[in-house]
Image (cartoon, helix red, strand yellow):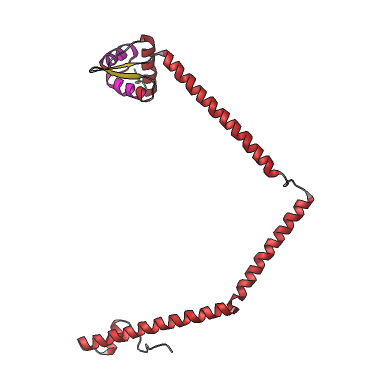
């Protein structure tokens, strides 16, 4: 004989709500653990967990009186909650319908003057041709950009800056080689080989 399957969380929640609606009374946790197990088949160990989830969802009310904590849920409140939820959903549906109407009006207005016609097709075709011509001319302009006096002057300045930087680093290398020769008495050929410095390294003219 197969082992009986336990109740799911949803089944436990449903049965506990049934218990509250049937009893229409106030209960402490200990009472719920005992009676829910006896009458609804909810194990006493899971009563607190299920009860907490129902309280968190606003389905079961709770309050502390003195040192005791009581729990209760009446069918009237559940009915009110369902009614309120239904009203909220209806309001959302109404808002969505109004938004849909507004969007349809906006689309209709946006289409004004854009109806398909021979004139509109000709204008769009001409626009496409002009855009293609613009792209071609920009490409052609880029080809001749190298002949622009400003571009040439800019290249000259960049070349001068690069040359000065190269000579500055060459000077630094010569200074470093001189310091190494004086400090450690190395021959220049040994230094060049060790640091992979070309033998013909010299300043740019």
The residue furthest left is 184
Left or right: 57 in relation to 158: left
At 30% across and 84% down in the image, what residue appears?
193
Picture quadrant of residue 24: top left
- Most foreground residue, 160 or 190: 160
Left or right: 113 in relation to 36: right
Observer able to see residue 142: yes
- The relative height of residue 44 versus residue 176 in the rendered view (above or below) is above
**x, y (%) of residue 195?**
30, 81
**x, y (%) of residue 105?**
66, 37
- The relative height of residue 135 versus residue 152 in the rendered view (above or below) is above
Is-magenta flag for residue 43? Answer: yes
**x, y (%) of residue 33?**
28, 16
At 62% across and 76% down in the image, what residue appears?
144
Observer able to see residue 3: no
- Most foreground residue, 193 or 170: 170
At 48% across and 23% down in the image, what residue appears?
85
Is-magenta flag for residue 187? Answer: no
- Most foreground residue, 174 or 195: 174
The residue furthest right is 118
Q: Report the span colored magenta.
A: 30-53
At 41% across and 83% down in the image, what residue appears?
164
Picture quadrant of residue 40: top left
- The relative height of residue 58 versus residue 158 in the rendered view (above or below) is above
Picture quadrant of residue 177: bottom left
| Predominant secondary structure, magenta span | helix
**x, y (%) of residue 154?**
52, 78
């Amino acid at each position: 004989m197969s082992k009986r399957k336990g109740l799911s969380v949803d089944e436990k929640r449903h049965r506990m709500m049934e218990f509250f609606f049937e009893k229409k009374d106030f209960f402490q946790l200990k009472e719920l653990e005992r009676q829910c197990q006896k009458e609804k088949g909810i194990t006493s160990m899971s009563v607190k967990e299920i009860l907490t989830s129902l309280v968190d969802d606003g389905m079961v009310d709770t309050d502390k009186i003195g040192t005791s904590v009581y729990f209760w849920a009446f069918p009237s409140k559940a009915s009110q909650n369902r009614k309120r939820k239904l009203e909220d959903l209806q309001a959302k549906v109404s808002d969505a319908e109004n938004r849909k109407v507004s969007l349809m009006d906006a689309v209709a207005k946006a289409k004004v003057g854009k109806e398909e016609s021979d004139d509109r097709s000709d204008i769009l075709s001409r626009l496409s041709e002009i855009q293609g011509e613009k792209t071609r001319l920009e490409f052609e302009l880029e080809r001749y950009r190298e002949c622009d006096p400003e571009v040439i002057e800019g290249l000259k300045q960049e070349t001068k800056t690069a040359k000065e930087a190269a000579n500055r680093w060459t000077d630094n290398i010569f200074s470093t080689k001189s310091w190494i020769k004086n400090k450690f008495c190395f021959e220049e050929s040994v230094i060049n080989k060790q640091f992979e410095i070309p033998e013909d390294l010299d300043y740019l003219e």
